[in-house]
Each structure stands twice: as C-alpha cells, then as structure tokens.
C-alpha cells in the first residue's frame, strides 16, 4: 500500500511533505539544505561574523602597536 493510500484510509498519521521538502531529500529538519540551514543558524552566523570582526580589529591594533614599538626602538638606537 502506498503512502497516499495509507493516509486516505486514515491508518497513517504522518503527513505528506509540502513545499521544498516534497522534492528535496536534504530539505528536512537538521538537514543539509543550505537555504534552510542559513535560516536556522542566522543568529549563529551573525555572532561568528561579529567575533571574527572583533578578532581582526584586535589584531590590527596589535599590528599598529608592534609597528609603533619598532619605530620607537629604531629611534632609540639612532
Ligand atoms: Zn531547505
């Protein structure tokens, strides 16, 4: 008996997949569909971008500090 007939008979409690889930096997809960994964993990992606930006900003500050230290050392050697 097919799934459709089982639903029609009332013996099956599950529902047919609708929308993208009907034709894409990866478009399920916790699935690999990139579209749905991005929607699901929106806050995590934004938090990661924010953390990466903070790390970049910190490294840039460190670079400028190191450059200033080098210049000060070079000046003091002269
Ligand atoms: Zn999907």
Image: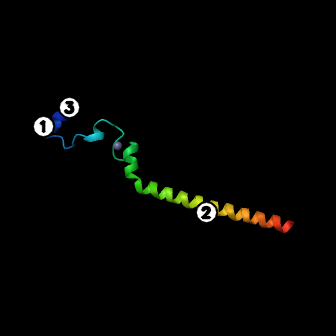
Dot 1 corresponds to which residue? 9
Separation of disc 3 and disc 1 at Cα?
11 Å
Q: Position of residue 23 (x, y in %)?
A: 30, 35
Instruction: Report the label total.
Output: 3
**Are there few (<14), some (14-19), or many (20+) residues within 10 Å of tag 3?**
few
Q: Which residue lies at the image location 37% right of the left edge and 50% below the top edge?
A: 39
Asked if residue 11 lies left or right of residue 60, the reply is: left
Q: Which mark, by number, is residue 59?
A: none
Dot 2 corresponds to which residue? 58
Q: Is mark 1 within 8 Å of ligand 1?
A: no
Q: Is mark 3 within 8 Å of ligand 1?
A: no
Q: Secondary structure at mark 1?
A: helix
First-in-chain label (3 vs 2) = 3
Most foreground residue, 31 or 56: 56
Dot 3 corresponds to which residue? 2
Q: Residue furthest top?
A: 1
First-in-chain label (3 vs 1) = 3
Q: Residue furthest right?
A: 78
């Amino acid at each position: 008996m097919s799934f459709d007939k089982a639903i029609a008979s009332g013996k099956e409690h599950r529902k047919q997949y609708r929308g993208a889930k009907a034709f894409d096997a990866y478009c399920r809960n916790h699935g690999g569909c990139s579209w749905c994964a991005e929607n699901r993990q929106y806050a995590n992606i934004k938090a990661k971008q924010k953390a990466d930006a903070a790390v970049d900003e910190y490294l840039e500050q460190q670079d400028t500090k190191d450059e200033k230290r080098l210049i000060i050392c070079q000046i003091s050697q002269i």
